[in-house]
Image (cartoon, helix red, strand yellow):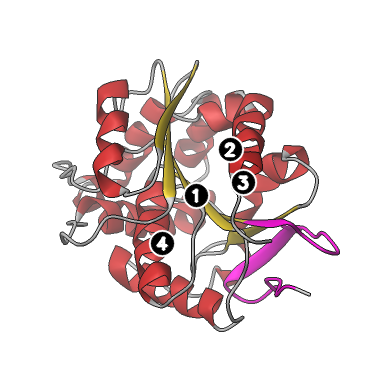
Amino acid sequence: MGITIGSSEWLRILRSVPTPRRHLLCFPPGGGAATVYRELAKRVGAGVAVVAVQYPGRQDRMREAPITELGQLADRIAEEVLRHGIIDGLALFGHSMGATLAFETACRLERAGQPVSTLFASGRPAPSFVETQRIHLGTDADLIADLERLAADPAPIQMLRDEPSLAELVLPPMRGDYQAIETYRYTKGDPLAADIVAMVSTADPTMTPEQADEWRAFTSGSFERATFSGGHFFIDEHPAEVAASVTTHLAKDHSPA
């Protein structure tokens, strides 16, 4: 019987399967928690166990300080995955900051001998992209304004302006995630053996389809770009379509399971 990923401080089970054919490990976007992938977990195909990373500084880890260096986050997550032993049929999915973090984690897993079948890199330019914004150094108002810019519905973000006590809880880990991605710099290394599927939307203000294509250089396996309608958080706007794309690509994976 193959090894399955268990729940821990860092890893949360969103869908358990008795004898999974595949594992999908999901990395939340900046400011997000493991629960952002509940809809995806419900909709991916049969036989896929879905696990999501829970970063420090949110939900039941609210009392912990956020980790503001992306490489350190990847180290901790890879260590947590590797302690289970070699997991068959492991794919990674990350959105926005989570895409870059999933890539860095995949690099560490492959170097340690843990195969990764597919990396789904959603809503984020390739690792070679250099972020010039320094929103993490700005005011709370600057941070909230950027959240409104990216949100599919900016109305809920207004609560952070209206309720200072809520902002005090939400903004520190959000700022930490902005710092992690804004200070990230890719260190050139071997391309992944994992296939890469770069997911992008037609109206994402943070990237273009051409930038999505730049992920091709980061794999020695196959590459595909999947394009969706919507804005930066198209995964929330079109969960069924995203889940269908993930399911299709996992079904193409012929690695042992």
CB-based contact (under 8 Å), mark 2 and mark 1: yes
Query: What amino acid type should be assigned to the residue bearing mark 2?
Result: His
- The disc, 2 or 1, on the residue closer to the chain's N-terminal end is 1
Nearer the observer: mark 2 or 4; the answer is: 2
In the image, is residue 2 above or below residue 122? below
Where is mark 2, residue-wise?
249
The residue lying toward the viewer, choosing from 220 and 244, is: 220
Nearer the observer: mark 4 or 1; the answer is: 1
- The disc, 4 or 3, on the residue closer to the chain's N-terminal end is 3
Query: What amino acid type should be assigned to the residue bearing mark 1?
Result: Thr
Q: Are there few (<14), some (14-19), or many (20+) residues within 10 Å of tag 4?
A: many
Where is mark 1, residue-wise?
118
Query: What amino acid type should be assigned to the residue bearing mark 4?
Result: Ala
How far apart in space, not on screen, are marks 4 and 1 (Cα)? Answer: 9 Å
Q: Going by the image, does 159 lie left or right of 199?
A: right
CB-based contact (under 8 Å), mark 3 and mark 2: no
Where is mark 3, residue-wise?
36
Q: What residue appears at the point 43 percent right and 53 percent down from the top-left corner?
A: 194
Where is mark 4, residue-wise?
106
Q: What residue appears at the point 52 percent right and 26 percent down from the top-left corner?
A: 234
Query: How many marks do you count on the picture?
Result: 4
Nearer the observer: mark 1 or 3; the answer is: 1
In the image, is residue 121 above or below residue 61? above
The image position of residue 230, as x and y in percent, is 49, 18
